[in-house]
Image (cartoon, rainbow, N blue to C red):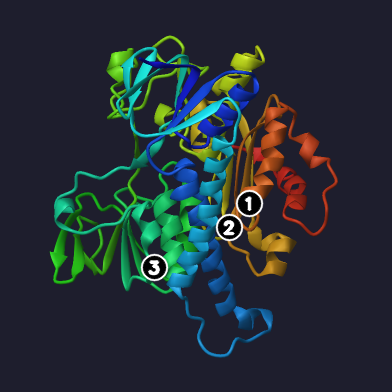
């Protein structure tokens, strides 16, 4: 006989636990199912562990620059990766256990561990038990994709998940993929002491960014000794004794690179292949992402998909926003929509990139008459004082409405300062609101009015 609940949530990533808590607080009986580690990607293999590792790498990098700041550390700065990993593991465990303990202690919420598969639009099977509910929410996340490259099945490789188990400094880390994940690990391990080579199939790093931003990022990572190989059109992999060789079809020599370890960072795929979605009438696209409407409803009545598995965002903050949209619409009678949110994200290299709204490329394609301004970080007082002058600030506005269309802040504090502009965009206020505001000195944010005073027509 089936166990009945008001709601079933599959997965405990960023959207699932918060939704469970809010539904349960409203008096609903909730079953939340987890087949792996509580907390999803962010807690276990994504945001929390990687940013913890980045912090350790930053500390080592800053220590090596001591002479620039007027102090010296006796001897060489050496990284103990076992201690670095232990610190990361402790922080992750705290978050992981916190999510599980909170869910288990939530009234009206039943935690079930196991693999859920749909049996019908109203039921799922877990551990040979059938659960039924009037509402079902899918929050199963995603995983690293494995590219169909020649020889990939003949060599050992790492992904963002298995990198979390590394407790040593690779002699030469080869990274296939020159985007967000690849670049964060590249700089991190270069600072830990590895030789690092990044291989990218495209003509530049982070192809979705504007060319000037991509070039600035390339200069930043190359300045730290990271090797960048672009235009790698046909990549092959093979063993070379105890090492790994990557064969390249590139414009530059050499045509083969040999390293000690290989990290694949070429994108992600949703964890939807083993849920028996067809039994519930839930459609997916050609990549496996669950098809949802603007309020995150699937093609099956009373079933929603939240987080990375719906293809409407690939970040912790988009997943959490999915939860807020669904919960407010169901429990507060709201009509929040995915299309209401403004794209925003960060690249957590050092210095970080904060992005919001449209890129310059997207603005040109839209044919909007726009104004744009750029300002180098080496003219920002706070950046000079900190000795972190790499990067730039770029802001674009609509020439007619004066509303901010998009911005990129590549520089110290860029991941935080970008929110000044993002909030003004949500308020649909003109850029003059920021331009005329009085900001604290000395900060990075105080230069936003200066940047906005330099707006010029954007060439189409």
229 on left or right of 14: left
Could you tell which of marks 1 and 3 lies nearer the N-terminus?
Answer: 3
Mark 1 — residue?
Answer: 414
Packing grade of label 1 (10 A; few <14, some 14-19, many >=20) is many
164 on left or right of 14: left
Q: Residue at x 82, y 57 (%)?
A: 441
Q: Nearer the viewer, residue 380 or 175?
A: 175
Label 3: which secondary element: loop
Q: Quadrant of residue 387?
A: bottom right
Q: Is residue 396 visible?
A: yes
Residue 303 position in % (x across, y down):
44, 16
Q: Residue at x 32, y 30 (%)?
A: 127
Could you tell which of marks 3 and 2 lies nearer the N-terminus?
Answer: 3
Packing grade of label 3 (10 A; few <14, some 14-19, many >=20) is some
238 on left or right of 448: left
Mark 2 — residue?
Answer: 391
């Amino acid at each position: 006989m089936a166990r009945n609940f008001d709601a079933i949530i599959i997965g405990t990533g960023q959207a699932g636990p918060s939704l469970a808590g809010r539904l349960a607080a409203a008096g609903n009986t909730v079953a939340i199912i987890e087949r792996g580690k509580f907390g999803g990607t962010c807690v276990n293999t994504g945001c929390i562990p990687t940013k913890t590792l980045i912090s350790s790498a930053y500390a080592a990098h800053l220590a090596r620059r001591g002479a620039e700041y007027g102090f010296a550390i006796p001897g060489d700065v050496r990284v103990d990766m076992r201690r670095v990993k232990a610190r990361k593991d402790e922080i992750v465990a705290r978050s992981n256990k916190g999510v599980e303990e909170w869910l288990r202690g939530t009234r009206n919420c039943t935690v079930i561990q196991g693999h859920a598969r749909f049996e019908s639009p109203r039921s799922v099977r877990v551990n040979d038990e059938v659960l039924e509910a009037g509402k079902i929410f899918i929050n199963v996340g995603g995983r690293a994709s494995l590219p169909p490259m020649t020889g990939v099945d003949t060599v050992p490789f790492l992904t963002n998940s298995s990198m979390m188990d590394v407790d040593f400094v690779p002699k030469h880390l080869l990274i296939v993929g020159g985007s967000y994940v690849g670049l964060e690990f590249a700089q991190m391990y270069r600072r830990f002491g590895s030789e690092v080579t990044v291989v990218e199939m495209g003509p530049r790093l982070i192809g979705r960014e504007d060319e000037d931003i991509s070039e600035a990022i390339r200069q930043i990572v190359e300045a730290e000794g990271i090797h960048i190989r672009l235009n790698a059109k046909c990549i092959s992999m093979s063993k070379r004794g105890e090492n790994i060789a990557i064969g390249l079809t590139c414009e530059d020599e050499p045509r083969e690179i040999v390293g000690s370890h290989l990290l694949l960072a070429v994108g992600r795929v949703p964890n939807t292949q083993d849920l028996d979605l067809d039994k519930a009438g839930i459609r997916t696209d050609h990549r496996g992402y669950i098809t949802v409407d603007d309020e995150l409803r699937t093609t099956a009545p009373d079933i929603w998909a939240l987080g990375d598995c719906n293809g409407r965002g690939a970040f912790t903050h988009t997943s959490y926003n999915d939860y807020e949209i669904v919960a407010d619409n169901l429990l507060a009678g709201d009509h929040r929509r995915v299309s209401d949110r403004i794209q925003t994200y960060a690249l957590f290299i050092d210095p970080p990139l904060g992005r919001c709204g449209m890129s310059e490329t997207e603005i040109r394609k839209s044919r909007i008459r726009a104004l744009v301004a750029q300002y180098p970080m080496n003219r920002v007082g706070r950046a000079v004082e900190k000795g972190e002058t790499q990067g730039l600030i770029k802001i674009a506005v609509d020439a007619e409405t004066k509303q901010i269309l998009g911005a990129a802040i590549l520089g110290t504090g860029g991941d935080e300062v970008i929110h000044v502009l993002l909030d003004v965009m949500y308020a649909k206020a003109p850029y003059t609101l920021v331009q005329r505001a009085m900001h604290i000195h000395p900060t990075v944010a105080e230069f936003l009015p200066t940047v906005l005073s330099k707006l010029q027509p954007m060439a189409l």
